[in-house]
Image (cartoon, grey):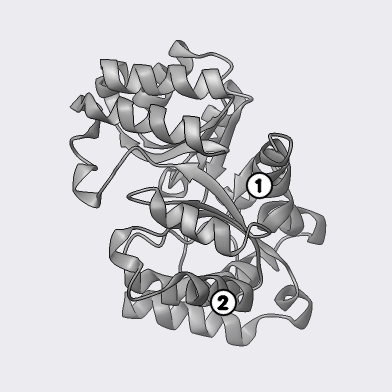
Amino acid sequence: MPRLLSALLLAGACMPALAAELPIFDAHIHYSHDAWESVPPKEAIAILRKAGVKRALVSSSNDEGTQNLYAEAPDIIVPELRPYRSRSEIGTWARDETVIQYLEQRLAKYRFVAIGEFHLYGADADLPVPRRMVELAKQYGLMLHAHSDVDALERLFRQWPEARILWAHSGFEQPAKVREMLRKHRNLWSDLAFRSDHGGGGEVAPEWREAFVEFPDRFLVGTDSFTPERWHYIGEHARWSRAWLADLPKDLAEKIGWKNGEAAIFEPFSKRR
């Protein structure tokens, strides 16, 4: 982590002035139970605003965190519903039937744009609990934010061919595999919360550049505040994102930086009001 922080600081220092003005749609933010005291809602929103985050797709374990942030700043927060009531359920939720009641209750009470981010791999996608989750997403017209391997993604699409899926951490995959999946599924978006070439400079690796050029409307950036201390990296991550986006043509940088998030996530949510 210290090496990554050094890279973020260096990228920020080297960033062109124009890039510093680029808004950010952060498509991967968590505000879970262990963050509420150390980073209260007002402070969390202040961090987002200071970082130049135009909008943030937020989920939490449990959902009260997301609702508290949304109440504080509905102009920034775009809520999604995570199927976890605590972080400890990451590895158990897919076999826990009580998750369904929790999802049904929250969906009946609040508005969301997506269900996720959830961890789901391989054949587990076909278990009864994930299947019911997909049915609920279909019923409410919600995106699925899946931290999954290719096998699970394919199973989700087989259950619901018209599903809209945001593939969390797909930046860890090889660019060729990401492009293959984006070609195959027109309703799949790539969440770049971390990327395989995230090193210190502001240059984008040729393989990723080719992917971005081929699919300019299908990539989004994200911080992934998976622990409370990660909230204090949101500003640095925004600066780092602007630094590597500045290595792309301006229109492409704007799409990945914020416009794709607006089109794929915020606009569908705003229509649900």
| Residue in the image at 66% along x and 72% along y | 52
Q: Residues within 10 Å of mark 2 (few under 14, many from 20)?
A: few
Q: Amino acid at mark 2?
A: Ala
Q: Residues within 10 Å of mark 1 (few under 14, many from 20)?
A: many
Q: Mark 2 highlights which residue? A: 46
Residue at horizontal 73%, vertical 74%? 19
Identify residue type, mark 1: Phe
Q: Is residue 6 above or below residue 205?
A: below
Residue, disc 1: 212
Q: Where the C terminus falls, by quadrant?
A: top right
Tell me: 103 left or right of 180.
left
Q: Position of residue 96 (x, y in %)?
A: 20, 28
Quadrant position of residue 22 = bottom right
Please tell me which residue lies in front, 40 or 9: 40
- Distance from the alpha carbon under mark 1 to that under mark 2: 31 Å
Work out which quarter of the rendered image holds the N terminus and state it.
bottom left
Q: Position of residue 161 (x, y in %)?
A: 54, 13
Residue 128: image quadrant is: top left
Q: Secondary structure at mark 2?
A: helix
Determine whether the residue tagged by mark 1 lies in a helix, strand or loop.
Answer: helix
Q: Residue at x 40, y 31 (%)?
A: 105
**For discs 1 and 2, the disc positioned in front in the rendered view:** 2
Residue 262 visible in this rendered orientation of the protein: yes
On the question of residue 201 being in view, the answer is no
Residue ranking furthest to the bottom: 13
Q: Residue at x 59, y 24 (%)?
A: 141
Q: Looking at this view, is 68 or 252 the one in front?
A: 68
Q: Earlier in the sequence, mark 1 or mark 2?
A: 2
Query: Taking 68 as reference, is 212 left or right?
Result: right
Is 110 located above or below residue 60 in the figure?
A: above
